[in-house]
Image (cartoon, grey):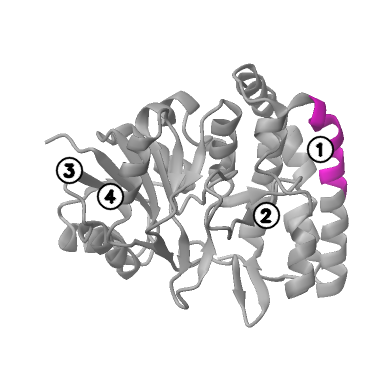
Protein backbone atom coordinates (compact mmCIF):
# COMPACT_ATOMS: atom_id res chain seq x y z
CA UNK A 1 0.00 0.00 0.00
CA UNK A 2 1.40 3.39 -0.98
CA UNK A 3 2.05 5.48 2.13
CA UNK A 4 0.43 8.88 2.57
CA UNK A 5 3.14 10.10 4.96
CA UNK A 6 6.85 9.33 4.93
CA UNK A 7 8.38 10.01 8.34
CA UNK A 8 12.08 10.75 7.78
CA UNK A 9 14.36 10.44 10.81
CA UNK A 10 17.99 11.55 10.54
CA UNK A 11 20.02 9.60 13.09
CA UNK A 12 23.55 9.78 14.43
CA UNK A 13 24.67 7.94 17.57
CA UNK A 14 22.53 7.02 20.56
CA UNK A 15 20.54 3.92 19.53
CA UNK A 16 18.28 4.19 22.59
CA UNK A 17 17.42 7.78 21.69
CA UNK A 18 15.66 6.77 18.50
CA UNK A 19 13.51 4.09 20.18
CA UNK A 20 11.15 6.63 21.74
CA UNK A 21 10.98 8.59 18.49
CA UNK A 22 9.94 5.55 16.44
CA UNK A 23 7.56 4.38 19.17
CA UNK A 24 5.79 7.76 19.01
CA UNK A 25 5.22 7.28 15.28
CA UNK A 26 3.77 3.80 15.82
CA UNK A 27 1.49 5.18 18.55
CA UNK A 28 -0.23 7.63 16.20
CA UNK A 29 -4.02 7.86 16.09
CA UNK A 30 -3.94 7.98 12.28
CA UNK A 31 -5.73 5.64 9.91
CA UNK A 32 -3.77 6.31 6.71
CA UNK A 33 -0.63 4.36 5.74
CA UNK A 34 2.71 5.63 7.04
CA UNK A 35 6.27 4.59 6.27
CA UNK A 36 9.31 5.31 8.44
CA UNK A 37 12.72 5.99 6.93
CA UNK A 38 15.87 6.29 9.06
CA UNK A 39 19.17 7.60 7.73
CA UNK A 40 22.10 6.53 9.91
CA UNK A 41 24.92 9.03 9.40
CA UNK A 42 27.87 6.63 9.81
CA UNK A 43 27.35 6.13 13.54
CA UNK A 44 30.38 4.46 15.12
CA UNK A 45 28.31 2.79 17.84
CA UNK A 46 25.78 -0.06 17.67
CA UNK A 47 23.04 2.13 16.12
CA UNK A 48 22.68 0.22 12.84
CA UNK A 49 22.55 -3.21 14.47
CA UNK A 50 20.12 -1.91 17.08
CA UNK A 51 17.76 -0.43 14.50
CA UNK A 52 17.86 -3.58 12.36
CA UNK A 53 17.12 -5.79 15.35
CA UNK A 54 14.48 -3.71 17.12
CA UNK A 55 12.90 -1.82 14.22
CA UNK A 56 12.88 -4.14 11.20
CA UNK A 57 9.85 -2.30 9.79
CA UNK A 58 11.78 0.91 9.07
CA UNK A 59 13.52 1.58 5.77
CA UNK A 60 17.12 2.04 6.91
CA UNK A 61 19.60 3.99 4.81
CA UNK A 62 23.19 3.45 5.94
CA UNK A 63 25.73 6.12 5.06
CA UNK A 64 29.35 5.12 4.64
CA UNK A 65 30.44 8.64 5.62
CA UNK A 66 29.13 11.28 7.97
CA UNK A 67 27.36 13.67 5.60
CA UNK A 68 25.28 15.88 7.90
CA UNK A 69 21.60 16.65 8.36
CA UNK A 70 21.00 18.19 4.92
CA UNK A 71 22.28 15.29 2.85
CA UNK A 72 20.63 12.77 5.18
CA UNK A 73 17.19 14.32 4.69
CA UNK A 74 17.71 14.83 0.96
CA UNK A 75 18.48 11.12 0.62
CA UNK A 76 15.41 10.11 2.58
CA UNK A 77 13.21 12.49 0.58
CA UNK A 78 14.53 10.93 -2.65
CA UNK A 79 13.66 7.46 -1.35
CA UNK A 80 10.30 8.41 0.18
CA UNK A 81 7.03 7.28 -1.42
CA UNK A 82 4.55 9.31 0.60
CA UNK A 83 2.55 12.30 -0.56
CA UNK A 84 3.85 14.17 2.49
CA UNK A 85 7.21 14.19 4.24
CA UNK A 86 7.58 14.65 7.97
CA UNK A 87 11.16 15.42 8.92
CA UNK A 88 11.57 14.35 12.52
CA UNK A 89 14.62 14.55 14.78
CA UNK A 90 15.64 11.36 16.50
CA UNK A 91 15.40 13.23 19.82
CA UNK A 92 11.77 14.26 19.20
CA UNK A 93 8.55 12.42 20.07
CA UNK A 94 5.15 13.08 18.50
CA UNK A 95 2.00 13.41 20.57
CA UNK A 96 -0.53 10.69 19.60
CA UNK A 97 -2.69 12.95 17.39
CA UNK A 98 0.23 14.67 15.61
CA UNK A 99 -0.06 13.05 12.17
CA UNK A 100 -3.84 13.35 12.15
CA UNK A 101 -3.57 17.05 13.04
CA UNK A 102 -0.92 17.78 10.41
CA UNK A 103 -2.78 15.89 7.68
CA UNK A 104 -6.07 17.65 8.48
CA UNK A 105 -4.36 21.04 8.38
CA UNK A 106 -2.64 20.25 5.08
CA UNK A 107 -5.93 19.08 3.58
CA UNK A 108 -7.68 22.27 4.68
CA UNK A 109 -5.13 24.60 3.06
CA UNK A 110 -5.78 25.30 -0.59
CA UNK A 111 -2.10 25.25 -1.60
CA UNK A 112 1.11 23.45 -0.63
CA UNK A 113 2.46 24.63 2.73
CA UNK A 114 5.13 23.86 5.29
CA UNK A 115 3.63 22.96 8.67
CA UNK A 116 4.78 22.25 12.18
CA UNK A 117 3.34 21.58 15.64
CA UNK A 118 3.77 23.28 19.01
CA UNK A 119 7.12 22.24 20.48
CA UNK A 120 7.38 21.21 24.15
CA UNK A 121 10.50 20.67 26.23
CA UNK A 122 10.77 16.96 26.93
CA UNK A 123 11.98 17.32 30.50
CA UNK A 124 9.72 20.09 31.81
CA UNK A 125 6.75 19.89 29.45
CA UNK A 126 6.91 23.66 28.96
CA UNK A 127 6.03 25.17 25.60
CA UNK A 128 9.18 26.06 23.64
CA UNK A 129 7.63 27.59 20.56
CA UNK A 130 4.71 27.56 18.15
CA UNK A 131 6.98 27.95 15.16
CA UNK A 132 9.36 30.91 14.97
CA UNK A 133 9.44 34.48 13.76
CA UNK A 134 12.73 36.09 12.67
CA UNK A 135 14.61 39.19 13.75
CA UNK A 136 16.29 41.48 11.16
CA UNK A 137 19.41 39.28 11.13
CA UNK A 138 17.55 36.00 10.60
CA UNK A 139 17.81 34.86 14.20
CA UNK A 140 14.79 32.66 15.12
CA UNK A 141 12.42 34.20 17.67
CA UNK A 142 10.09 31.65 19.34
CA UNK A 143 6.42 32.37 18.67
CA UNK A 144 4.46 31.86 21.88
CA UNK A 145 1.20 33.42 20.73
CA UNK A 146 -1.43 30.66 20.41
CA UNK A 147 -3.47 32.90 18.11
CA UNK A 148 -0.64 33.32 15.62
CA UNK A 149 -0.63 30.57 12.98
CA UNK A 150 1.50 32.05 10.19
CA UNK A 151 5.19 32.03 11.11
CA UNK A 152 8.54 32.69 9.47
CA UNK A 153 9.95 29.19 9.96
CA UNK A 154 9.54 25.84 11.61
CA UNK A 155 12.30 24.02 13.43
CA UNK A 156 13.62 21.07 11.42
CA UNK A 157 13.00 18.78 14.38
CA UNK A 158 9.38 18.49 13.18
CA UNK A 159 8.78 19.82 9.67
CA UNK A 160 5.88 18.68 7.47
CA UNK A 161 6.00 19.39 3.75
CA UNK A 162 4.28 17.97 0.64
CA UNK A 163 6.79 16.02 -1.41
CA UNK A 164 5.87 18.08 -4.49
CA UNK A 165 6.77 21.31 -2.66
CA UNK A 166 10.01 19.77 -1.38
CA UNK A 167 10.96 18.94 -4.97
CA UNK A 168 9.92 22.39 -6.20
CA UNK A 169 12.12 24.09 -3.58
CA UNK A 170 15.02 21.70 -4.16
CA UNK A 171 15.19 20.35 -0.60
CA UNK A 172 18.03 21.37 1.68
CA UNK A 173 21.29 22.79 0.27
CA UNK A 174 23.80 19.94 0.60
CA UNK A 175 26.60 22.44 1.23
CA UNK A 176 24.97 23.76 4.42
CA UNK A 177 25.90 20.48 6.14
CA UNK A 178 23.84 20.86 9.32
CA UNK A 179 22.05 23.72 11.10
CA UNK A 180 20.11 26.52 9.42
CA UNK A 181 18.67 24.36 6.66
CA UNK A 182 15.17 24.74 8.12
CA UNK A 183 15.59 28.53 8.12
CA UNK A 184 16.60 28.45 4.46
CA UNK A 185 13.79 26.13 3.33
CA UNK A 186 11.02 28.01 5.12
CA UNK A 187 12.21 31.42 3.93
CA UNK A 188 12.55 30.02 0.43
CA UNK A 189 8.95 28.77 0.60
CA UNK A 190 7.57 32.05 1.91
CA UNK A 191 9.46 34.05 -0.70
CA UNK A 192 7.74 31.88 -3.34
CA UNK A 193 4.31 32.53 -1.85
CA UNK A 194 3.85 29.27 0.08
CA UNK A 195 2.49 29.45 3.65
CA UNK A 196 4.53 28.36 6.66
CA UNK A 197 2.10 27.59 9.48
CA UNK A 198 1.86 26.03 12.92
CA UNK A 199 -1.11 23.88 13.94
CA UNK A 200 -3.00 25.14 16.98
CA UNK A 201 -3.36 21.72 18.62
CA UNK A 202 -1.27 18.58 19.25
CA UNK A 203 2.53 18.93 19.44
CA UNK A 204 5.82 17.16 19.89
CA UNK A 205 8.23 16.76 22.78
CA UNK A 206 11.87 17.51 22.09
CA UNK A 207 15.04 16.67 23.98
CA UNK A 208 16.61 19.88 22.68
CA UNK A 209 20.28 19.49 21.86
CA UNK A 210 20.39 15.76 22.63
CA UNK A 211 21.30 14.75 19.08
CA UNK A 212 23.63 17.62 18.18
CA UNK A 213 24.66 19.30 21.44
CA UNK A 214 24.14 22.82 22.73
CA UNK A 215 21.22 25.20 22.19
CA UNK A 216 19.83 24.72 25.68
CA UNK A 217 19.10 27.08 28.54
CA UNK A 218 20.20 25.40 31.76
CA UNK A 219 20.05 27.06 35.18
CA UNK A 220 19.33 30.36 33.50
CA UNK A 221 22.36 30.21 31.19
CA UNK A 222 22.44 29.57 27.46
CA UNK A 223 24.84 26.72 26.73
CA UNK A 224 26.08 25.75 23.29
CA UNK A 225 29.15 24.32 21.57
CA UNK A 226 31.79 25.75 19.28
CA UNK A 227 30.72 23.51 16.42
CA UNK A 228 27.04 24.31 16.72
CA UNK A 229 27.67 28.04 17.04
CA UNK A 230 30.06 28.05 14.06
CA UNK A 231 27.61 26.21 11.81
CA UNK A 232 24.71 28.35 13.00
CA UNK A 233 26.41 31.67 12.33
CA UNK A 234 27.82 30.56 8.98
CA UNK A 235 24.61 29.04 7.62
CA UNK A 236 22.45 31.84 8.94
CA UNK A 237 24.71 34.23 7.01
CA UNK A 238 24.37 32.05 3.91
CA UNK A 239 20.56 32.04 4.23
CA UNK A 240 20.43 35.81 4.78
CA UNK A 241 22.60 36.35 1.67
CA UNK A 242 20.43 34.13 -0.53
CA UNK A 243 16.98 35.07 0.73
CA UNK A 244 17.02 38.79 1.56
CA UNK A 245 15.19 40.83 -1.11
CA UNK A 246 17.59 43.05 -3.14
CA UNK A 247 16.73 46.48 -1.72
CA UNK A 248 17.41 45.25 1.83
CA UNK A 249 20.55 43.17 1.25
CA UNK A 250 22.82 46.15 0.56
CA UNK A 251 22.17 47.46 4.06
CA UNK A 252 21.53 44.24 5.96
CA UNK A 253 24.52 42.08 5.01
CA UNK A 254 27.31 44.57 5.92
CA UNK A 255 25.52 45.42 9.18
CA UNK A 256 25.12 41.72 9.98
CA UNK A 257 28.82 40.99 9.36
CA UNK A 258 29.97 43.97 11.44
CA UNK A 259 27.75 42.96 14.34
CA UNK A 260 29.04 39.38 14.18
CA UNK A 261 32.64 40.58 14.46
CA UNK A 262 31.73 42.81 17.40
CA UNK A 263 29.84 39.95 19.05
CA UNK A 264 32.77 37.57 18.59
CA UNK A 265 35.21 40.10 20.05
CA UNK A 266 32.98 40.69 23.08
CA UNK A 267 32.53 36.96 23.71
CA UNK A 268 36.27 36.36 23.36
CA UNK A 269 37.06 39.07 25.92
CA UNK A 270 34.33 38.11 28.39
CA UNK A 271 35.05 34.37 28.25
CA UNK A 272 38.81 34.86 27.76
CA UNK A 273 38.79 32.25 25.03
CA UNK A 274 40.48 33.23 21.77
CA UNK A 275 39.15 30.12 20.05
CA UNK A 276 35.59 31.47 20.27
CA UNK A 277 36.59 34.23 17.85
CA UNK A 278 38.94 32.15 15.70
CA UNK A 279 36.64 29.12 15.44
CA UNK A 280 33.21 30.74 15.15
CA UNK A 281 33.37 34.34 13.94
CA UNK A 282 36.64 34.90 12.10
CA UNK A 283 36.00 32.14 9.50
CA UNK A 284 32.67 33.65 8.30
CA UNK A 285 34.19 36.09 5.79
CA UNK A 286 36.49 33.45 4.21
CA UNK A 287 33.54 31.02 4.12
CA UNK A 288 31.46 33.60 2.25
CA UNK A 289 34.27 34.08 -0.26
CA UNK A 290 34.78 30.34 -0.80
CA UNK A 291 31.04 29.80 -1.31
CA UNK A 292 30.55 32.92 -3.44
CA UNK A 293 29.63 31.06 -6.64
CA UNK A 294 27.10 28.84 -4.90
CA UNK A 295 25.68 31.87 -3.11
CA UNK A 296 25.37 33.94 -6.29
CA UNK A 297 23.80 31.06 -8.24
CA UNK A 298 21.41 30.20 -5.40
CA UNK A 299 20.44 33.82 -4.90
CA UNK A 300 19.72 34.32 -8.61
CA UNK A 301 17.61 31.15 -8.71
CA UNK A 302 15.63 32.06 -5.57
CA UNK A 303 15.07 35.73 -6.34
CA UNK A 304 13.88 34.99 -9.88
CA UNK A 305 11.10 32.89 -8.36
CA UNK A 306 10.08 35.42 -5.72
CA UNK A 307 6.35 36.16 -5.77
CA UNK A 308 5.89 37.54 -2.24
CA UNK A 309 5.91 41.31 -1.84
CA UNK A 310 8.32 42.90 0.63
CA UNK A 311 5.42 43.43 3.01
CA UNK A 312 4.25 39.82 2.79
CA UNK A 313 7.73 38.46 3.39
CA UNK A 314 8.57 40.84 6.24
CA UNK A 315 5.23 40.24 8.00
CA UNK A 316 6.80 37.38 9.97
CA UNK A 317 9.76 39.47 11.19
CA UNK A 318 10.13 41.32 14.48
CA UNK A 319 12.47 44.27 14.71
CA UNK A 320 14.10 43.85 18.10
CA UNK A 321 17.34 41.77 17.77
CA UNK A 322 16.90 38.38 19.39
CA UNK A 323 20.48 38.24 20.68
CA UNK A 324 20.01 41.42 22.73
CA UNK A 325 16.96 39.87 24.38
CA UNK A 326 18.88 36.66 25.11
CA UNK A 327 21.78 38.69 26.53
CA UNK A 328 19.39 40.57 28.82
CA UNK A 329 17.74 37.37 30.04
CA UNK A 330 20.66 34.93 30.21
CA UNK A 331 23.90 36.89 29.95
CA UNK A 332 26.69 35.89 27.61
CA UNK A 333 26.35 32.30 26.34
CA UNK A 334 28.63 29.58 27.63
CA UNK A 335 30.35 27.96 24.67
CA UNK A 336 31.89 24.59 25.36
CA UNK A 337 34.08 22.28 23.31
CA UNK A 338 32.53 20.79 20.20
CA UNK A 339 31.00 17.34 20.37
| Mark 2 element type | helix
The residue located at (41%, 37%) in the rendering is 74
Quadrant showing the C terminus: bottom right
Q: Which mark is residue 253?
A: 1
Q: Main secondary structure of the magenta part?
A: helix
Residue on which the image places disc 3: 33
User: Quadrant where the N terminus lies?
Assistant: top left
On residue 230, which mark appears? 2
Q: Is residue 85 magenta?
A: no
Q: Which residue is mark 4?
A: 100
Circle 3: element type? loop
Query: For mark 3, does the 10 Å Cα neighbourhood hold few (<14), some (14 to 19), or many (20 or more) residues?
Result: few
Q: Are marks 2 and 1 in contact (CB under 8 Å)?
A: no
Q: Which element type, helix, strand or loop, lies under badge 4? A: helix
Give the CA separation, mark 2 to mark 1: 18 Å
Q: Nearer the viewer, residue 337 or 236?
A: 236
Disc 1 or 4, which lies upstream in sequence? 4
Query: Label 4 near label 3: C-beta < 8 Å?
Result: no
The reply to whether discs 4 and 2 touch (Cβ–Cβ < 8 Å) is: no
Taking depth in this image into account, of 160 and 11 the one nearest to the observer is 160
Instruction: Look at the image and give the residue range highlighted in magenta.
Output: 247-258
Residue 241 visible at all: yes
Picture quadrant where residue 201 is located: bottom left
**In the image, which disc is placed on residue 22?**
none
Amino acid sequence: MTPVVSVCIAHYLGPRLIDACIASVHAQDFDLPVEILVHDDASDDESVAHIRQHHPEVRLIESAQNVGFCVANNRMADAARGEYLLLLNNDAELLPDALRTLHAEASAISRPAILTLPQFDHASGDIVDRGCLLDPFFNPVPNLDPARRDVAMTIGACLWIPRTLWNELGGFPDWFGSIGEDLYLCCRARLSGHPVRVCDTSGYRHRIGASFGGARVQQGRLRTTLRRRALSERNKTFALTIITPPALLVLLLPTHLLLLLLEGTALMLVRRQTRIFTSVYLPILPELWRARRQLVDSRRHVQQRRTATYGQFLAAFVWWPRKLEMLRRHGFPEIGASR
